């Protein structure tokens, strides 16, 4: 999504449509966790993550658009949110520390990646061996979800792509009105 459409990320209906607090409850974000909000945009989830990882945790909020990071920084300052490090990501460098993350969260982002295999390899190297990669994606299997088809993913599609890059499927949760919560773990390293 272009920074020009950033208002859609903070639309008032998002709370009811996506139920972010329910998603984070299901995922199990806890104090002390080191997490990344990949494709953070304006920081809608970043702020919620920062509140949940306190005390002792940290949030890396990445985006490929400097304009989105400007909006994120403005939000963090206005809401007096600490413990967040904005990161300008690139296809060849996600800007995340190696082996340091308990959780990497991509909310409605994975389907937008221009080089998903390359990105997945970088994300995998940033996870702790016990870490989790979590995708929230609009359900392609459900035609009633009022999102364009090219912004949806099925469980089968996500599993095929992510497992191919060295992740193990852990579970899918369907507690949200419109989205899958897909949880993956890095495959055991030799």
Image (spheres, helix red, strand yellow):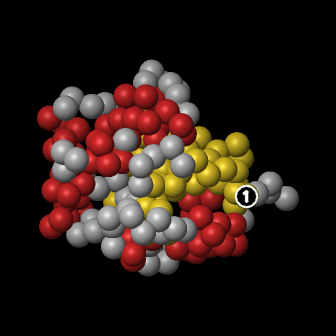
The residue tagged 1 is 168
Measured from the top left, where is residue 119 in percent x and y? 53, 68
120 w.r.t. 26: above or below: below
Please say whether residue 133 is visible from this viewpoint: no
Between residue 43 and residue 161, name the one nearer to us. Answer: 161
Residue at 15% from the left image edge and 67% from the top image edge: 4
Q: Secondary structure at mark 1?
A: strand
Residue at 48% from the left image edge and 50% from the top image edge: 105
Q: Is residue 41 left or right of residue 33?
A: left
Dot 1 crowding, Cα within 10 Å, few <14, some 14–19, many 20+: some
Residue at 55% from the left image edge and 44% from the top image edge: 103
Quadrant where the N terminus sits is bottom left
172 w.r.t. 149: above or below: above
Q: Is residue 182 left or right of residue 75?
A: right
Measured from the top left, where is residue 48 in percent x and y? 35, 35
162 w.r.t. 149: above or below: above
Q: Is residue 146 left or right of residue 105?
A: left
Measured from the top left, where is residue 52 in percent x and y? 43, 28
């Amino acid at each position: 999504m272009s920074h020009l459409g950033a208002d859609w990320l903070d639309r008032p209906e998002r709370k009811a449509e996506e139920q972010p607090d329910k998603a984070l409850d299901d995922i199990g974000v806890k104090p002390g966790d080191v997490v990344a909000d990949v494709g953070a945009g304006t920081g809608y989830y970043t702020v919620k993550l920062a509140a949940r990882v306190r005390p002792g945790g940290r949030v890396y909020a990445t985006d490929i658009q400097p304009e989105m990071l400007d909006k994120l920084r403005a939000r963090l300052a206005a809401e007096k949110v600490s413990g967040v490090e904005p990161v300008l990501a690139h296809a060849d460098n996600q800007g995340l520390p190696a082996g340091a993350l308990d959780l990497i969260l991509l909310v409605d982002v994975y389907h937008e990646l221009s080089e998903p295999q390359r990105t997945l390899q970088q994300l995998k190297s940033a996870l702790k061996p016990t870490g989790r990669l979590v995708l929230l994606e609009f359900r392609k299997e459900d035609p009633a979800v009022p999102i364009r088809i090219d912004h949806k993913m099925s469980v089968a599609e996500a599993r095929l792509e992510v497992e191919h890059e060295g992740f193990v499927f852990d579970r899918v949760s369907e507690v949200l009105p419109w989205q899958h919560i897909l949880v993956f773990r890095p495959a055991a390293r030799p």
